[in-house]
Image: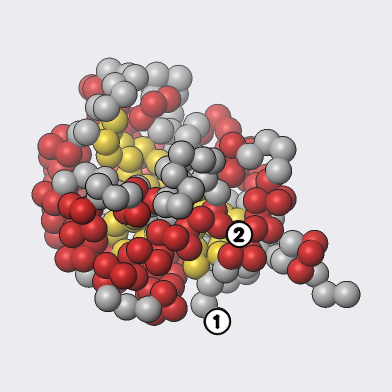
């Protein structure tokens, strides 16, 4: 049976109960996870996490942290991404909601990550919040320079960014926000998007879906987002699982087939 993939989580945030979190993910039917980088300086942490079966990682600088890592060169990103279990560049992009760093610096670092994705052949994980117009402009400009693959992660933007992303060949990943009562527009975007461009994620430990909203999120909860996405698309959860897992394997083309080991309670006697 095909298992779900949590295409975007932050396992480094689980300081005391990581093994229990992974066991619950496996029990819920989540076979693989991609733990996403927020700091290039933490790459050793991500490598260590990815020594566990079923766990893969990315390398990059989140827009919240570009002030701490303003000048990581393309060559460094490409070199670090050579690790066999590094499957993506990022997350990188623009966040004008919190605006923690100057916008011109966010844009410069975003373009650096795009160049690294283009040159490495790995997909870029894009963070876009309250910055649709500039994200669209940069994506169109950079795609004209040369093609690259990417995913608009934790999609919560408007239909224009979704349309441009799809036209440029990008994927769209939905998080627990899709399950929120007031996310009608987001569900409409998901309904209109092609099935072969959709991913599911948690962004754990943030953005827990219903019925866990307001609590700490974890990879096991991706099943609730998958259920709502299946309803929106008019397919069964197993069909949605097969489709989104195939999309993950196509986009994150280095991702291996090994899956999370069963937790202690599930181990064979």
Q: Is residue 241 above or below residue 103?
A: below
Determine the image quadrant of residue 244.
bottom left
Q: CA distance from mark 1 to mark 2?
A: 15 Å
Place of residue 171 in the rendered image (x, y in percent of width and height, measured from the top left): 29, 59
- Residue lying at the far right in this picture: please name it: 269
* Element on which disc 1 rests: loop
Tell me the number on the disc at residue 185: none
Where is residue 58? Give x, y as percent: 49, 47
**Which image quarter holds the C terminus?**
bottom right
Give the quarter of the image for residue 253.
bottom left
Which is more toward the observer, 175 or 116?
A: 175
Residue at horizontal 62 percent and vertical 69 percent from the top: 258
State which tag comes first along the sequence, 1 or 2. Answer: 1
In this rendering, does residue 84 appear at all? Answer: no
x then y, percent, for residue 169 = 22, 61
**Which part of the image, by quadrant, shows the N terminus?**
bottom right
Give the residue drawn at x 23%, y 58%: 187
Residue shown at the point (71%, 43%) measured from the top left: 17
Residue 191 against residue 39 in the figure, above or below: below
The residue at the point 36 percent across, 38 percent down is: 92
Crowd around label 2: few <14 · some 14–19 · many ≥20 (10 Å): many
Is residue 43 shown left or right of residue 245? Answer: right
Are the residues at dot 1 and dot 2 in contact (C-beta closer than 8 Å)? Answer: no
Q: Secondary structure at mark 2?
A: helix
- The front one of 218 and 129 is 218
**Residue 100 appears left or right of 37:** left
In this figure, which residue is indicated by the disc labeled 2?
25
| Residue designated by label 1 | 1
**Left or right position of 246 against 24:** left
> In this orientation, does residue 217 appear?
yes
């Amino acid at each position: 049976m095909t298992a779900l993939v949590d295409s975007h989580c932050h396992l480094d945030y689980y300081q005391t109960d990581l093994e229990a979190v992974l066991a619950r993910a496996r029990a819920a039917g989540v076979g693989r996870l991609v733990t996403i980088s927020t700091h290039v300086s933490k790459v050793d942490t991500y490598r260590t996490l990815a020594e566990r079966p079923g766990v893969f990682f990315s390398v990059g600088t989140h827009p919240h942290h570009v002030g701490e890592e303003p000048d990581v060169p393309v060559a460094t990103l490409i070199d670090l991404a050579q690790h066999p279990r590094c499957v993506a560049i990022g997350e990188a992009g623009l966040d004008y909601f919190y605006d923690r760093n100057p916008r011109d610096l966010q844009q410069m670092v975003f373009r650096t990550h795009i160049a690294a994705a283009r040159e490495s052949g790995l997909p870029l994980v894009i963070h876009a919040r309250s910055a649709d117009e500039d994200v669209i402009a940069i994506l169109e400009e950079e795609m004209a320079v040369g093609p690259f693959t990417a995913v608009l992660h934790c999609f919560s933007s408007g239909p224009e960014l979704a349309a441009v992303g799809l036209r440029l060949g990008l994927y769209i990943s939905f998080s627990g926000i899709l399950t929120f009562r007031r996310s009608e527009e987001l569900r409409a975007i998901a309904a209109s998007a092609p099935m072969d461009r959709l991913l599911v994620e948690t962004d754990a430990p943030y953005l827990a879906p219903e019925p866990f909203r307001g609590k700490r999120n974890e990879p096991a909860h991706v099943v609730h987002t998958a259920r709502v996405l299946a309803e929106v698309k008019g397919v069964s959860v197993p069909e949605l699982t097969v489709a989104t897992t195939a999309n993950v394997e196509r986009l994150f083309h280095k991702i291996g087939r090994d899956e999370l080991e069963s937790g202690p309670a599930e181990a064979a006697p």
